[in-house]
Image: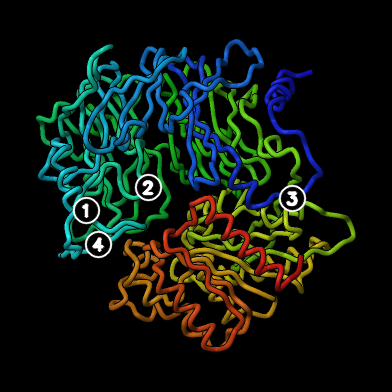
Amino acid sequence: MPRTALLTLCLLAALPVAADARGLEARDLVALERVSSPTLSPDGRHLVFAQRSIDFDANSGTSALYVRNLVTRDLAPPKRLTPDGWNVNSPAFSPDGGTVYFLSAKNGAQQLYAIPLAGGTPRQLTGFATDVGTYHVSPDGNRVAFSASVFGDCGADFACTKQRMDARKDSKVSGVVYDQLFVRHWDTWADGTRNRLFVADLPAQGAKPASSATAVSAALDGDIPGRPFGGAEDYTWAPDGRSLVASVKVAGREEPWSTNFDLYRLDAGGGAAPVNLTADNAAWDAGPVFSADGGTLFYRAMKRPGFEADRYALMALDLASGERREIAPGWDRSPSSLQPSADGRALYVAAQDTGEYPLFRVDVATGEVTRLVGGGSVSAFEVAGETLVYSRNAIDTGDVIHVASLDGQGERAITPTAAERLPGVDFGAFEQFSFKGAKGATVHGYVVKPSNFEEGREYPVAFLIHGGPQGSFGNGWSYRWNPQTYAGQGYAVVMIDFHGSTGYGQAYTDAISGDWGGAPLEDLQKGWAAAQQKYAFLDGDNACALGASYGGYMVNWIAGNWNGPWKCLVNHNGVFDTRSMGLVTEELWFTEWENGGTVFDNPEAYERHNPARHIEKWRVPMLVVAGQNDFRVPIDQSLSTFTALQRQGIDSKLLYFPDENHWVLKPQNSVLWHDTVNAWLKQHIGP
């Protein structure tokens, strides 16, 4: 028997015994343990990863670190490294590989801790009054660079920031005066703080946690990491430990409509002024990483200012000469992350490609691109020594951590699949298909069979429309919009990657800008027809269309422009009035790029594909979902949709979450979301 099979049997030994088979349900999805952050020791011989468990009654989750010796292949399951009762994140190894660092709020504010790889009691390394947000330990292991959210005039006096925040909480005055935009972002109102970078000495064994630090980014009025989704990948140490390089968008009046992130070199001692290394590029520069010798800075760069979905090019900057060049300029894909090989001759990168998210190896000298790992979506990866580790998921697996050699060969699974974690659950089979869509282009989609599929039967259909709009519903796993939750209720699922989707070349991605209701709608219509022609089990007369964000916009657009096929609709936080959206959303660069200017400069573009202009043609029952803290597509869009439905007497419901943002994240809210959506489908298209 192969070792991989033996490993799977060993991992399954501790899993529950299978009951009668059934489809995936929302409670399964919410309760499923999730693995992330695969991290290798410098020699590639040990793996540490995080595993999150949900306490449904407490409506929260906790994460622990697990370790696996990759050399012994002793078939033992990974061993828990962090103690019970600790909720931790962001693992990293010390340079000698003997210590594992992580962040935890175990004793109050989130701080940096260390634990021996062999196990033991965690030791607190920092003791600041505010949270340590992200960190990187220096190459020599003696210092740590970290981010913290502080008031600019407080500098490295973290107690100053805490005292000011506490005073606000205790104040009887709640009003706030703003004098420029970005008053709110994603789900948070601006409070005057910035994410800043600091450097602190790590304490010796037995010494008290570090309580003082040097501010190294104070001269830059910008967030490092960028808000809301930036992380430790936004900055890095130089190999000599004398400086750091960080991606930062300098703030100011233009911040809400600018995508100009630049790479700045920061003096690790806080003395010298920051140096802008990419001042010549007014678009987004991101993800800096050094070659091992420190002579080359690799990074990703967009070319078009103001466009958040532009193609990322792989760049190499020679720090001695200042010369830069694009690596693999003919490769029409947009990498989301990168890591150099030890010898600097290759880059390992992940990038979307035709409905999947594979891992590639790119030769730095020639630009030759080799696909290493496919068969789904790689969500994280790392290389060290002779080992490649990655987390990969597919429509029917959830995230699974694998290890392989550097060429992607010899793959073996370290953690179980979703099916192995849920032995009593059947998953729907799926396949990709293609057809001729708008402009004669080849368009791709996926069909997922119901988990209770039987040949010769027809099944009602959930037609899922992805958001973004520059996004994809491909071969990947999601904890929010997961096609298996519909397959588990007895529905077939159809998903189309219409014009504007990512992973099919930049021209295809560009095609949706200025044409939200044009080619994408035609692709959806032709994809719907092609799927029915190809798959006899689809009951095309008994279907519901569902989408969120741009997908919710498309649901509104469909309601007024293609309502014939649908028995019901589901609109989660979707755009109702494109003109209003251009003035109420927070990241103005998005709406202004998509519509070719501001609302007042180009009003016709905002009206061209505006669902609000077609509400008199609405007639299909619609479920509307809204989150109070959604500042991307603010709640007025959802309330306007619901009002238009109710005022016309159209069967409709509103599911309102006062404590959620653009997404539904709390476990019990997630179950309520799924239960409400499933009940709506059952009411209109049956079980």
Say which residue label 4 marks: 183
Judged from the image, the secondary structure of the residue bearing numbered disc 1 is helix
Labels 1 and 3: the sequence-earlier one: 3
Residue occupying the point 25% across, 60% down: 182
Say which residue label 3 marks: 23
Percent position (x, y) of residue 670? Answer: 55, 55
Say which residue label 2 marks: 229
Give the left or right position of residue 560, taking residue 319 as reference. right
Q: In the rendered image of this protein, does residue 30 appear above or below residue 212?
A: below
Residue type at mark 1 is Lys
Residue 332 visible in the displayed image: no
Labels 4 and 2: the sequence-earlier one: 4
Residue type at mark 4 is Val
Percent position (x, y) of residue 526? Answer: 67, 69
Residue occupying the point 26% across, 12% down: 206
Say which residue label 1 marks: 169
Q: In the rendered image of this protein, does residue 576 appear above or below residue 646?
A: above
How far is the residue under mark 1 from the one under mark 3?
47 Å
Q: Which mark is residue 140?
A: none
How far is the residue under mark 2 from the one under mark 1?
25 Å
Number of numbered discs visible in the structure rendering: 4
Give the left or right position of residue 234, taking residue 500 as reference. left
Q: Quadrant of the N terminus?
A: top right
